[in-house]
Amino acid sequence: MNEGIRLLGTDEPLPMELLLEADPSEEMISRYITDSRILAAEENGRMIGVCVVLAVSPEIAEIKNIAVAERARGRGIAKSLIKEAAVYAKREKFSAIEIGTGNSSLDQLALYQKCGFRIAAVERDFFTRHYPKPIFENGIQCRDMIRLQYKL
Ligand SMILES: CC(C)(COP(=O)(O)OP(=O)(O)OC[C@H]1O[C@@H](n2cnc3c(N)ncnc32)[C@H](O)[C@@H]1OP(=O)(O)O)[C@@H](O)C(=O)NCCC(=O)NCCS
């Protein structure tokens, strides 16, 4: 098995299918993707995970999107992508890395806290304001954005 994580070149095609797994709106993706760098996890020449990092200020890098192909989940690939994103952000001299997720994304909230992130803020009604249709996960409506931060 040949696997690894690398930064995608800016001229490489966008892994849109994976990006849509984490963010259901292509319009929202188009707003951040051109200014971001993409870390890609590959296995036997196929892309199985992505992590999109955007500089939101000179100090803060934000993970805007993280997704692992369904067949490859539960093997620590998201954890490795987050670790690589932190290495990349530290090398680029950011002082912290942030990530936002929905109040209903219970697995993701567990994952990020296991990676060392702490809850830093809550943006109430973010999802009800920015997405055209109601989103439900785990039987909970996704309304609020939970912002988590990891100091580098
Ligand atoms: C979220 C996602 C990226 C996780 O990818 P993954 O490669 O399966 O995750 P990993 O295997 O690296 O790690 C999962 C970790 O979170 C833990 N975890 C997940 N759900 C959990 C839960 N409900 N309670 C406790 N821990 C949980 C796992 O146990 C594991 O930790 P461990 O190594 O200590 O056991 C993947 O499920 C995905 O692509 N989902 C769709 C897109 C998405 O929702 N993206 C995030 C948008 S905010």
Image (spheres, grey):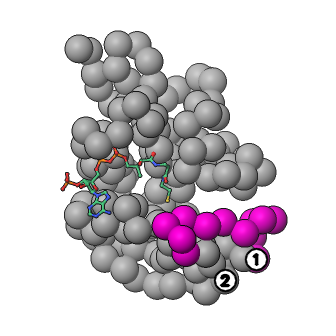
Tell me which residue sits at (55%, 37%) in the image. 18
Residue 4: percent from left, percent from top: 29, 26
- Relative height, residue 149 to residue 88 (above, below): below
- Circle 1: residue type: Arg
Tell me which residue sits at (35%, 13%) in the image. 44
Question: Label 2, on which residue?
Answer: 125
Identify the image quadrant of residue 74: top left
Magenta stretch containing residue 107, yes or no? Answer: no
Mark 1, secondary structure of its residue: helix
- Relative height, residue 66 to residue 151 (above, below): above
Q: Which residues make up the magenta segment?
A: 129-140
Along the viewing direction, whichever of 9 and 140 lies nearer the viewer:
140
Residue 22: percent from left, percent from top: 55, 50
Check the picture and name the quadrant holding the N terminus.
top left
Instruction: Evaluate whether residue 70 shows in this view.
Output: yes
- Relative height, residue 13 to residue 28 (above, below): above
Mark 1 vs 2: CB contact within 8 A: yes
In screen coordinates, is 4 left or right of 140? left
Mark 2, secondary structure of its residue: loop
Question: Label 1, on which residue?
Answer: 129
Tell me which residue sits at (67%, 51%) in the image. 24
- Relative height, residue 52 to residue 45 (above, below): below
In screen coordinates, is 96 left or right of 18? left
- Circle 2: residue type: Asp
Residue 47: percent from left, percent from top: 45, 24
Mark pair 1, 2: CA separation: 6 Å
Along the viewing direction, whichever of 57 and 84 lies nearer the viewer:
84
Residue 54: percent from left, percent from top: 53, 54
The residue most toward the front is 139
Identify the image quadrant of residue 21: top right
